[in-house]
């Protein structure tokens, strides 16, 4: 308690010292070493029974939330790709048939990967489902979101760079206590690519079993990071994102994307756009064309909250990966401003950071402003690459803290975004804090569209008043 008081006091003093400058928190988590949990640990336990389904996870299966894609792996033989589901436990009135596939990666051979699209679901409903055969069958459930509606409330979690260490486990357990209904995952899943010489591919399977405790029961919305690229010519593996694309399907066709790595969904009152930091995005590329169109498809009257996910942060003041997001900023930032994006979540940097609303769209290589400036129409940029993977924390922030950085701290955690209605959402970043979930950075997010619409209406009203009051003087001319 005393430590917390001292810590809060130091934050206040820092703030007073720096005036309006951002806060660099001195808290650094050090309890557990950044090593992967041993393969034999119970968090990676293989479910009992011959060919029992494992690594079960779901994601949204369509544009509006009335479908899910259920995925799982059977280790011994292809088995069945059928999902039996219904509205009460043990009573499965419906079935859906999926597909099965597998792949090799260097000397690793995957299990049999099943994917089943379940469509025609009712909104706001709990479904129970069963997969697998006989004694090896396994049962789970999930809840569909409320119908797409401007005032639908919904709580998202945001996790990035998770990996499979004891810190990752702490993040996952804390997230599962948050009451959030769906994870926006900002890339770098298993860190299996760190195993080039031993246990090749194996850590994809352990990670799948690790996250099943959450991902089998609620959709995780996937975006890809650099650890998903797995470009290893020395091993004869030259197809980028191979394991990720086999294992983690996305509903990209529902948003007319040509590639699973970038796509959009609508869920409750949010329109979520997933971008790929490691796919071409400059002018005229498929991702550029797609985003241009998708931003036009956003209807803020239906989905007031416009959220963008990407792996590499555009505004980052950590020494780690500094300026890596600059190329995407130079291409897309103008659009983010124009379309009044509410918030952009990224990972990649193993620390937490939040920006003020700022933009740098006036910069050009021939001159002009080369520094971000306050901009009420800009999104807030949040980096949550602090899931807890084996590479450890990025603890060296640039000094002095740039004006655009509002809060930054090098410790592990996750965020939640609780949308209340079309105008307000509550945001929290929760530091794991050596075993206890601690809310460290929180604020009320005001919607960029409905906030500005209100401002616009007010402006119009004032303008009308001024026109009316100015009429006599206009008449004089
Ligand atoms: Fe990364």
Image: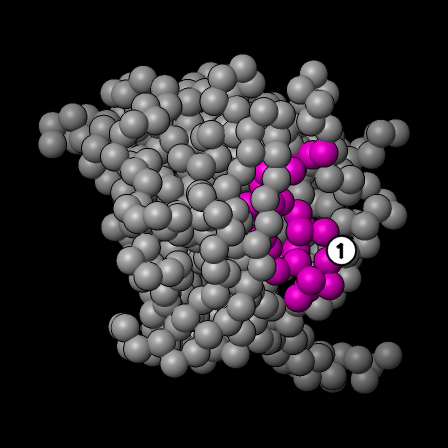
- Is 43 above or below relative to 340? above
Q: Nearer the viewer, residue 68 or 460?
A: 68
Percent position (x, y) of residue 393? 42, 22
Which secondary structure lies at badge 1? loop
In the image, what residue occupies the spot 30% across and 48% down? 49
Residue 377 visible to an observer of this rendering: no
Is residue 168 in view from this perspective?
yes
- Say which quarter of the image contains residue 9: top left
User: Residue beneath label 1, please?
Assistant: 258
Question: Which residue is nearer to you in this view: 450 or 476?
Answer: 450
Of residue 455 and residue 257, the one placed in the foreground of this image is 257
Q: Which residue sits at x=25%, y=50%?
A: 177
Dot 1, how many residues are within 10 Å of its Cα: few (below 14), some (14-19), or many (20+)?
A: few
Q: Which residues are magenta?
A: 239-263
Coordinates of residue 249 in the picture (x, y in percent): 58, 52
Query: Is residue 125 in the magenta section?
Result: no
Image quarter of the C terminus: bottom right
Spot occupied by residue 44 in the image (x, y as percentages of width and height): 33, 36
- Which quarter of the image is occupied by the N terminus? top left
| Rendered image quadrant of residue 159 | top left
Could you say where residue 280 lies in the image, as x and y percent from the top left?
78, 40
């Amino acid at each position: 308690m005393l430590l917390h008081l001292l810590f809060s006091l130091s934050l206040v003093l820092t703030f007073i010292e720096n005036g309006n400058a951002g806060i660099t928190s001195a808290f650094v988590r050090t309890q557990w070493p950044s090593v992967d949990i041993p393969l034999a640990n119970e968090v990676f336990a293989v479910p009992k029974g011959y060919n029992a389904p494992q690594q079960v996870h779901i994601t949204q299966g369509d544009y509006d939330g009335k479908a899910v894609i259920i995925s799982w792996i059977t280790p011994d033989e292809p088995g069945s790709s059928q999902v039996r589901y219904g509205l009460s436990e043990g009573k499965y009135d419906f079935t859906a048939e999926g597909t099965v596939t597998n792949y090799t990666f260097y000397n690793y051979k995957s299990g049999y990967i099943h994917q089943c699209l379940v469509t025609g679901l009712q909104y706001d409903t709990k479904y129970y489902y069963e997969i697998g055969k006989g004694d090896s069958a396994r049962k789970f459930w999930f809840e569909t979101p409320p119908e797409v509606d401007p005032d639908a409330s919904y709580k998202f979690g945001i996790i990035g760079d998770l990996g499979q260490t004891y810190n990752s486990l702490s993040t996952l357990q804390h997230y599962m206590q948050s009451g959030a209904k769906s994870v926006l995952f900002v890339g770098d899943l298993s860190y299996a690519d760190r195993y080039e010489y031993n246990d090749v591919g194996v850590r994809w399977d352990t990670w799948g079993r690790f996250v099943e405790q959450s991902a089998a029961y609620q959709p995780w919305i996937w975006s890809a990071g650099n650890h998903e690229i797995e470009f290893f010519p020395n091993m004869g593996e030259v197809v980028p994102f191979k394991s990720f694309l086999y294992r983690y399907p996305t509903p990209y066709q529902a948003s007319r994307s040509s590639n699973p790595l970038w796509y959009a969904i609508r869920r409750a009152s949010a329109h979520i756009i997933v971008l790929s930091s490691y796919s071409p995005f400059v002018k005229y590329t498929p991702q550029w064309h797609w985003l241009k169109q998708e931003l036009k498809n956003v209807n803020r009257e239906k989905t007031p909250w416009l959220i963008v996910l990407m792996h590499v942060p555009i505004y980052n003041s950590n020494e780690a990966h500094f300026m890596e997001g600059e190329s995407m900023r130079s291409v897309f930032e103008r659009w983010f401003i124009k379309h009044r994006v509410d918030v952009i979540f990224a990972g990649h940097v193993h620390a937490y950071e939040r920006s003020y609303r700022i933009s740098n769209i006036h910069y050009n290589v021939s001159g002009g402003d080369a520094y971000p400036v306050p901009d009420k129409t800009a999104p807030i940029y949040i980096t949550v690459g602090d899931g807890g993977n084996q590479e450890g924390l990025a603890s060296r922030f640039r000094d002095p803290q740039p004006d655009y950085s509002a809060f930054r701290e090098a410790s592990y955690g996750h965020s939640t975004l609780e949308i209340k209605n079309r105008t307000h959402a509550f945001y929290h970043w929760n530091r794991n804090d050596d075993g206890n979930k601690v809310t460290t950075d929180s604020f009320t997010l005001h919607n960029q569209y409905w906030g500005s619409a209100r401002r616009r209406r007010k402006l119009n009203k004032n303008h009308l008043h001024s026109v009316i009051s100015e009429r006599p003087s206009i008449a004089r001319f």
